[in-house]
Image: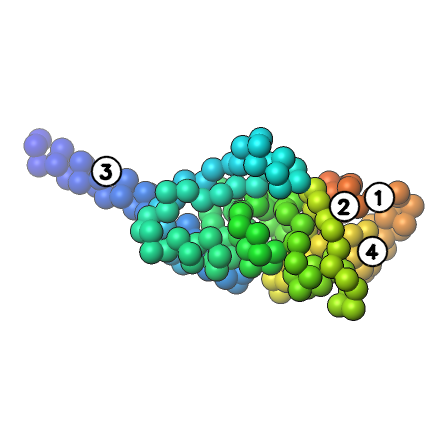
Amino acid sequence: MRKSQLVLLTVAISTLTIAQTQQNVFETFENFKSNQPTDYVEFKLKKRTDGNVFMTGGITNYRLKKILPKIKSEKLTKKVWGVLVDDSVYINSYPYSKIIGFNKIIEKGYYSYFIGEPARLKDEQSSLGIIKPDEPQKAVCCKTSYVILPHGEVKWLTRELLSELIKDNHELSTELKGEEISQEDAHKMFDYLNRYNEIKK
């Protein structure tokens, strides 16, 4: 009896240990796309306070706190593609915007998308499509909608880009042409991407 109880206890402890150290770091977009995190780092995901949200133009993004081992702090906050927490993925905003923080992926699909910080530096604004390469840096604020293209590039989601992304679907393209959508209508644009994703499955 004692032997069987000891075996059960050992299995339970082993299972708990595995669960606690389940890999939770996507080092690259390819890792995210294939749903294969490659590393485990202990951290706390903390939503920003109302004061911090106000100071960053209304973005309720997340920060990583209590990172262990500490030697991985720089890599985790500035280099990795994203992290997995429970069943949600949070993309690292630093690689594409040079702003420290993480944003929750709203949907993963042919086109994945999220709301995040607007990049403030010219090179990043140009790369994201906020400005053209020959245009001056733009003062930006407030929430910004982003789309992740199938090869991993992050782009600022505009009506014009949305139209290009769904142009091979006649029904959605026709519907979009007849609908008024402003840059602030992030969730309207996301709805088109959601329906496009369903068709691409």
Disc 4 target residue:
160
The residues tagged by marks 2 and 1 sit, at their Cα atoms, a distance apart of 8 Å
Q: Is residue 82 left or right of residue 107?
A: left
Does the CB distance between marks 1 and 3 fall below 8 Å?
no
Disc 2 target residue:
189
Quadrant (top left, top right, bottom left, bottom right) of the N terminus = top left
Of the residues under marks 3 and 4, which one precedes in the sequence? 3
Of the residues under marks 1 and 3, which one precedes in the sequence? 3
Q: Secondary structure at mark 2?
A: helix
Q: Amino acid at mark 4?
A: Glu
The x and y percentages for residue 150 are 64, 61
The x and y percentages for residue 72 are 37, 55
Q: Secondary structure at mark 3?
A: helix
The residue carrying pointer 4 sits among few (fewer than 14), some (14 to 19) or many (20 or more) residues within 10 Å by Cα, namely few
The residue carrying pointer 1 sits among few (fewer than 14), some (14 to 19) or many (20 or more) residues within 10 Å by Cα, namely some
Does the CB distance between marks 2 and 3 fall below 8 Å?
no
Does the CB distance between marks 2 and 4 fall below 8 Å?
no
Q: Is residue 45 left or right of residue 193?
A: left
Q: Secondary structure at mark 4?
A: helix
Q: Relative to the observer, which residue lies in front, 173 or 180?
A: 180
The x and y percentages for residue 182 are 83, 44
Disc 1 target residue:
181
The residue carrying pointer 3 sits among few (fewer than 14), some (14 to 19) or many (20 or more) residues within 10 Å by Cα, namely few
Of the residues under marks 2 and 3, which one precedes in the sequence? 3
Q: Amino acid at mark 1?
A: Ile
Residue, x 45% and y 44% (percent of image)? Answer: 64
The residues tagged by marks 2 and 3 sit, at their Cα atoms, a distance apart of 46 Å
Q: Which mark is residue 12?
A: 3
The residue carrying pointer 2 sits among few (fewer than 14), some (14 to 19) or many (20 or more) residues within 10 Å by Cα, namely many
